[in-house]
Image (cartoon, rainbow, N blue to C red):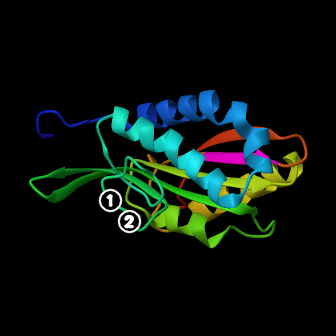
Amino acid sequence: MIPKGMTQMDSHDLADKIELELTSKILPMTKRLLMGRRIDWTREIKTVLGDLGIALRYEVAASGYKGASQGEFLYDMVWYQLDQGFLIDQSMVMEVEYLVAPLNCVDDDFQKLVQARANVRVWITTCANMSDVDRHVANCEKQIQVFRGSHDDDEYVLVFLEWLTNNCVIRRLPSHPQP
């Protein structure tokens, strides 16, 4: 039972809220983000998702986010809940990688998300063009599939800021573990 005043949300619904927030706030600023410095880019993304986490009544851990309850905690951002000082829920974990991801594998920061025990995992990175986005998504899917700890109900929100057209591409992935 979730203590009074705490959030309990289905993983899919939470991923929907995250995707909607990213679409409404990150998409319009994609060109500016890509032209900015890495630290500014990451801070703006943390502000958008940190504010959403607080609005949904989660504690937020992230370095560089002014509303955080604590600094970075294993991932670039975590939404969590405590009950009497004990961690009872980790609803969202996020990793942000500004550099273009390798095309033949996944970034090791994405691998942090695959092993995370969280309701929703958010991956934000850049790609050169749509062809690279498609390859990166395929690599992420493969990583999810081959990881023995993946579950059918795992939710991923993947965000790609694409350099060629200054476009923001959002893809959702449920995992499909191998038998």
Image spot of residue 178 (x, y percent): 55, 61
Q: Residue at x 67, y 39 (%)?
A: 170
Per the image, is 36 magenta? no
Residue 73 - label: 2
Count neighbours of disc 1 (C-alpha within 10 A) and say few if under 14, some if 14 to 19, many if 20 or more: some
Q: Is residue 96 visible?
A: yes
Q: Residue at x 60, y 58 (%)?
A: 96
Check disc 1 and give the amino acid type: Gln
Are the residues at dot 2 and dot 1 in contact (C-beta closer than 8 Å)?
Answer: yes
Check disc 2 and give the amino acid type: Phe
- Residue 154 is left or right of residue 26, and the answer is left
> Which residue of the protein is positioned furthest toward the bottom in this rendering?
108
Image spot of residue 158 (x, y percent): 63, 47
Quadrant housing residue 28:
top right
Residue ID for mark 1: 70
Q: Is residue 101 above or below residue 163?
A: below
Image spot of residue 60 (x, y percent): 35, 50
- Residue 101 is left or right of residue 7, and the answer is right
Q: CA distance from mark 2 to mark 1?
A: 8 Å
- Residue 141 is left or right of residue 168, and the answer is left
Q: Magenta region: which residues?
A: 158-162
Q: Residue at x 45, y 52 (%)?
A: 65
Quadrant location of the N terminus? Answer: top left
Image spot of residue 103 (x, y percent): 81, 65
